[in-house]
Image (cartoon, rainbow, N blue to C red):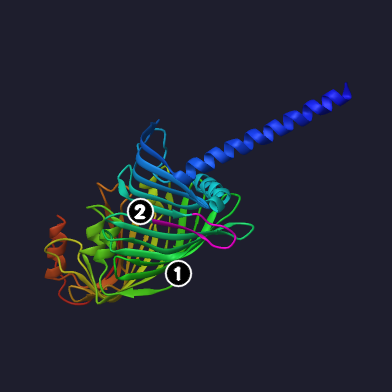
């Protein structure tokens, strides 16, 4: 009985090996000759003219790949967990893949081409993504502990911006890294960032000076109410960005303004608060945007020829459709015709005029 059992096991093992060998041989023969799929559809994926060839490694060529959102996505950006899962799959499949070349790739609003080169211990994997607007070139390696991504190029023609840098994805999963960005073709930034399942946070503290702030403000699309207060009513000879940080939540990108914190020093500043009113002129002005509030601190400033001293202004954009402007007036002033006309602009009637001396002003 034992002999018959052992003999049966041996026969089964040999049959399994022969079957597996025959299957591999048939697949290898098919792949060496090449497999062509004219059209294939599964769930929300449609592909056309796909060829798969084995030449020491697998080469896949695909003319059209259309991925239609199935309506279950909570965010347009894949989670860090998803990205790491893709990289794990790529790590194990990489040694068997020479390349995957997709001529036309469409997903949501993106339309472009994708080329992927599998990686091994000897060479990094490469992803090259291109469209009429976006170009992405990134290399991928695994250092034995984490996935390491090197962004050789991430650029957008639409936003006239480009990014290079590197990132590390750990087991948590968490993505951290540093990016060198050229925003709107005129604002160079060095940003550190981290991203997890909730969102992406970034920060930069290296001072950068530019001649015009409008292209940068337009890029961030702060809206028709907020943007003019920064890019049109605010003028200066130069703008020095000294601090920038914020967080983008995947499931609530509209909350970005609530987390955005930026500090800008404007030299030779002129700030206009209303049409027909003379601008406040200062040697320099510190502009701080934090928690949807724009704070304006002029230094060595004058208004209608009078010293502003410690006066400052804040504009609250918590309700973007109804911004609230609050002026903190702390100075010594002369109530002359200019001041009387200014108050009349805001429908404040002042029945007196000062002929000499100054008045201590502490108003909100």
CA neighbours of label 1 inside 10 A, class few (<14), some (14 to 19), many (20+)? some
Q: Tell me, yes or no, if residue 350 can be seen here.
A: no
- Across and down, in percent, residue 53 comes to 45, 47
User: Which residue appears at 40% of the width and 44% of the height?
Assistant: 51
The quarter in which the C terminus is drawn is bottom left
SS assignment at label 2? loop
Magenta range: 118-128
Image quadrant of residue 184? Answer: bottom left
- Across and down, in percent, residue 327 comes to 28, 61
- Across and down, in percent, residue 189 comes to 39, 69
Residue at the extreme right of the image, as rendered: 2
Residue 348 inside the magenta-drawn segment: no
Q: Which of the two residues, 175 or 356, is positioned nearer the viewer here?
A: 175
SS assignment at label 1? loop
Q: Which of the two residues, 335 or 6, is positioned nearer the viewer here?
A: 6
Q: Which of the two residues, 59 or 325, is positioned nearer the viewer here?
A: 59
Residue 127 inside the magenta-drawn segment: yes
Q: Which residue is mark 1?
A: 205
Q: Which residue is mark 2?
A: 292
Image quadrant of residue 334? Answer: bottom left
CA neighbours of label 2 inside 10 A, class few (<14), some (14 to 19), many (20+)? many
Task: Specify which label sits upstream in the sequence, 1 or 2.
Answer: 1
The quarter in which the N terminus is drawn is top right
Q: CA distance from mark 1 to mark 2?
A: 20 Å
Depth check, mark 1 against mark 2: the one in front is 1
Position of residue 275 in the picture relative to residue 100 (left or right) = left
């Amino acid at each position: 009985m034992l002999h018959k059992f052992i003999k049966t096991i041996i026969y089964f093992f040999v049959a399994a090996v022969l079957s597996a060998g025959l299957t591999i041989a048939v697949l290898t023969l098919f792949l060496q000759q090449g497999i062509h799929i004219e059209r294939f559809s599964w769930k929300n994926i449609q592909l056309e003219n796909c060829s798969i060839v084995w030449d020491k490694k697998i080469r896949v060529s695909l003319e059209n790949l259309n991925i239609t959102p199935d309506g279950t996505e909570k965010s347009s950006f894949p989670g860090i967990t998803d990205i790491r899962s893709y990289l794990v799959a790529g790590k194990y499949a990489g040694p068997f893949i020479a390349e995957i070349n997709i001529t036309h790739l469409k997903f949501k609003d993106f339309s472009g081409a994708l080329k992927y080169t599998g990686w091994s211990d000897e060479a990094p994997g490469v992803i090259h993504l291109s469209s009429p607007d976006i170009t992405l070139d990134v290399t991928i390696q695994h250092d034995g502990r984490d996935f390491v991504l090197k962004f050789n190029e991430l650029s957008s023609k639409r936003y006239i911006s480009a990014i290079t840098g590197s990132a590390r994805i750990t087991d948590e999963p968490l993505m951290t890294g540093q990016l060198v960005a050229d925003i709107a073709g005129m604002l160079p930034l060095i940003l550190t960032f981290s991203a997890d399942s909730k969102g992406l946070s970034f920060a930069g503290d290296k001072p950068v000076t530019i001649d015009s702030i409008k292209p940068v403000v337009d890029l961030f699309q702060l809206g028709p109410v907020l943007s003019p207060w920064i890019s049109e009513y605010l003028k200066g000879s130069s703008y020095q960005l000294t601090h920038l940080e914020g967080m983008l939540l995947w499931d609530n990108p509209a909350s970005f303004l609530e987390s955005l914190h930026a500090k800008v020093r404007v030299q030779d500043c002129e700030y206009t608060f209303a049409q027909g009113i003379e601008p406040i002129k200062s040697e320099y002005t510190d502009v701080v945007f934090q928690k949807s509030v724009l704070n304006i601190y002029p230094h060595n400033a004058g208004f209608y020829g009078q010293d502003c001293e410690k006066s400052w202004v804040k504009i609250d954009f918590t309700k973007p459709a109804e911004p609230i402007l609050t002026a903190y007036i702390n100075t010594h002033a002369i109530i002359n015709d200019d001041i009387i006309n200014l108050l009349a602009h805001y429908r404040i009637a002042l029945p007196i005029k000062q002929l000499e001396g100054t008045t201590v002003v502490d108003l909100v």
